[in-house]
Image (cartoon, grey):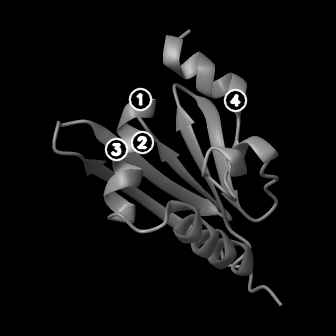
Amino acid sequence: MSTSLDVSAQLSLTNENGKNILVSAEKQIITVILPTLWVGNTALKQVTHGRNRSSMIADVHAALKHADLMVEFRIANRVIALLGAQTHPSFLSRLVGFGAIELKIVAILLSLTKI
């Protein structure tokens, strides 16, 4: 049985290169705004600290689902990925090692070109 949580937060993180990652939360949606895809990839590597990425993502996904929360990752006002409750990861997500993360391929490609 899941426990629905409502969250409210505003947070700004700065990486070692001075790039800002903005985190906000309202009700059941946590939004992470990344300046670039590369900053997100670097942050994910730092968080996993060499652990199995798919396993760690699966643990976070399970906790989010249990709390009825979802994290959306954005670049340039585009949702590039979702994790948690009400998400639908694809075969491609599992194939590239992101397991439970629902990747938005078109948005990811557009974020690379900054269109």
Q: How busy is the neighbourhood of tag 1: few (under 14 within 10 Å), some, or many (20 plus)?
A: some
Label 2 to label 3, Cα distance in Å?
A: 5 Å
Residues 44 and 77: in front is 44
Identify the residue shown where x is 32% and y is 50%: 12
| Dot 3 amino acid type | Thr
Which residue is denoted by mark 2 in the rendering?
A: 40
Q: Is mark 2 in CB contact (under 8 Å) with mark 3?
A: yes
| Dot 4 amino acid type | Ile
Label 2 to label 1, Cα distance in Å?
A: 7 Å
Image height of 114 relative to 77, above or below: above
Mark 3 or mark 1: name the one nearer the start of the chain. Answer: 1
Identify the residue shown where x is 39% and y is 32%: 38
Which residue is denoted by mark 1 in the rendering?
A: 36
Judged from the image, the secondary structure of the residue bearing numbered disc 3 is helix
- When asked about the image quadrant of residue 86, the answer is bottom right
Q: Which mark is residue 105?
A: 4
Label 4 to label 2, Cα distance in Å?
A: 15 Å
Image height of 45 relative to 40, above or below: below
Which marked residue is nearer to the observer: mark 4 or mark 1? 4
Q: Is mark 2 in CB contact (under 8 Å) with mark 1?
A: yes
Mark 4 or mark 2: name the one nearer the start of the chain. Answer: 2
Which residue is denoted by mark 3 in the rendering?
A: 42
